[in-house]
Image (cartoon, rainbow, N blue to C red):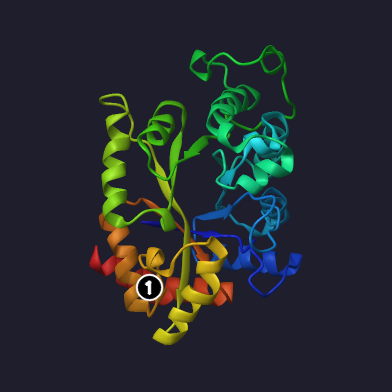
């Protein structure tokens, strides 16, 4: 199982600085994390740094890591604006971008840009086809889109066909079908799935793929993590930090790697056994130290158990 790291974009008490972001990216690269990720929100329960801006700010500290949006929002941003930004990232990183995209789960983001939240899936399907065209897909599979996108060639172009588009889905049949039919990969969400459900949804995803074709790659994103030896500290982190941040009951977050190293390894190992190829971790606090603890104390236990 590959390990990736989310940039710490939600302000959980430490604030933001360019130096801190760059130090985090450098540490993730030196520790052997293979992906560096950024999520997209305009507004959230806590201050949220813009993900595309943050990724661009750490390109030169990211080594050879894949730079991924997990996810970006073509409906909210507009496909042309998002395509331009993703292409710039891909050009400046020499072709290291994976563009994870989804409709978004925040009604507040839709209110802010004046779009009906209940129309997000229809608008996302249209935006995804447009995004493919704007990123340089010339195949018929990209689908018919508005003429204004067919006639436009955004420049500079990416140094390769792409970047690849991975479609986010929490695991509904419709979402998995969409990922299989029009995506280059699938992005799942760790706090919206258990290992058992992930296994079932991965199996469902594969039923939507052509027989004998390449298996769609996938990643388990937003895997909130916190390694500590004090069970009371772990419970406090769940109760006072993560539950309010996500507006989820504590009991729904018990499969996340939060607690002693052995507990974190057991939970990540369960996802690995369920078929997860790469897990994208998001430290809740003291992010660089947490990346070190996961690499030094948790990952070896996961490897020895799988």
**Residue that appears at 54% across and 27% down:** 122
Dot 1, how many residues are within 10 Å of its Cα: few (below 14), some (14-19), or many (20+)?
many
**Residue that appears at 38% across and 39% down:** 172
Q: Which residue is mark 1?
A: 298
Q: How many marks?
A: 1
Which of 30/269 is in front?
269
Q: Say if 106 sits above or below 46 in the image.
A: above
**Residue 25: percent from the left, percent from the top?**
62, 62
Q: Say if 171 sits above or below 61 in the image.
A: above
**Residue that appears at 55% across and 68% down:** 244
**Residue 277: percent from the left, percent from the top?**
36, 50
**Residue that appears at 42% across and 75% down:** 296
Q: Quadrant of residue 89?
A: top right
**Residue 11: percent from the left, percent from the top?**
66, 67
Q: Say if 138 sits above or below 117 in the image.
A: above
Q: Is residue 196 left or right of residue 81?
A: left
Q: Say if 169 sits above or below 241 in the image.
A: above
Question: If the image is split into quadrants, where does the C terminus sit?
Answer: bottom left
Q: Is residue 75 left or right of residue 81?
A: left
Question: If the image is split into quadrants, where does the N terminus sit?
Answer: bottom left
Q: Quadrant of residue 273?
A: bottom left
Q: Is residue 20 left or right of residue 192?
A: right
Q: Is residue 79 left or right of residue 236?
A: right
Which of 269/106 is in front?
106
**Does the image show residue 146?**
yes
**Does the image show residue 283?**
no
């Amino acid at each position: 199982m590959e390990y990736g790291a989310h940039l710490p974009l939600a302000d959980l008490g430490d604030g933001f600085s360019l130096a801190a972001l760059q130090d985090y990216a450098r540490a993730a690269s030196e520790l052997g994390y293979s992906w560096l990720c950024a999520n997209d929100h305009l507004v959230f329960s806590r201050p949220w740094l813009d993900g595309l801006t943050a990724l661009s700010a750490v390109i030169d500290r990211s080594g050879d890591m894949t730079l991924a949006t997990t996810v970006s929002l073509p409906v909210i941003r507009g496909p042309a604006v998002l395509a331009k930004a993703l292409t710039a990232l891909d050009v400046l990183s020499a072709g290291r971008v994976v563009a994870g995209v989804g409709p978004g789960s925040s009604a507040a983001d839709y209110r802010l840009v004046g779009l009906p939240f209940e129309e997000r899936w229809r608008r996302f399907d249209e935006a995804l086809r447009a995004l493919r065209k704007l990123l340089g897909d010339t195949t018929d599979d990209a689908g018919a889109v508005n003429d204004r996108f067919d006639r436009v060639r955004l420049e500079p172009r990416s140094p390769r066909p792409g970047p690849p588009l991975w479609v986010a889905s929490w695991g509904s049949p419709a979402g998995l079908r969409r990922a299989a039919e029009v995506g280059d990969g699938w992005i799942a969400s760790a706090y919206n799935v258990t290992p058992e459900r992930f296994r079932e949804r991965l199996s469902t995803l594969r039923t939507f793929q052509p027989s004998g074709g390449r298996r769609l790659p996938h990643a388990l994103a937003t895997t909130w993590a916190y390694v500590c030896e004090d069970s009371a500290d772990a419970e406090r982190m769940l109760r006072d930090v993560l539950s309010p941040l996500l507006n989820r009951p504590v009991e729904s977050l018990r499969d996340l790697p939060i607690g002693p190293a052995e507990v974190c390894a057991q939970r990540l190992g369960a996802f690995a056994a369920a078929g997860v190829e790469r897990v994208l971790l998001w430290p809740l606090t003291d992010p660089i130290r947490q990346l070190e603890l996961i690499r030094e104390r948790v990952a070896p236990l996961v490897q020895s158990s799988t």
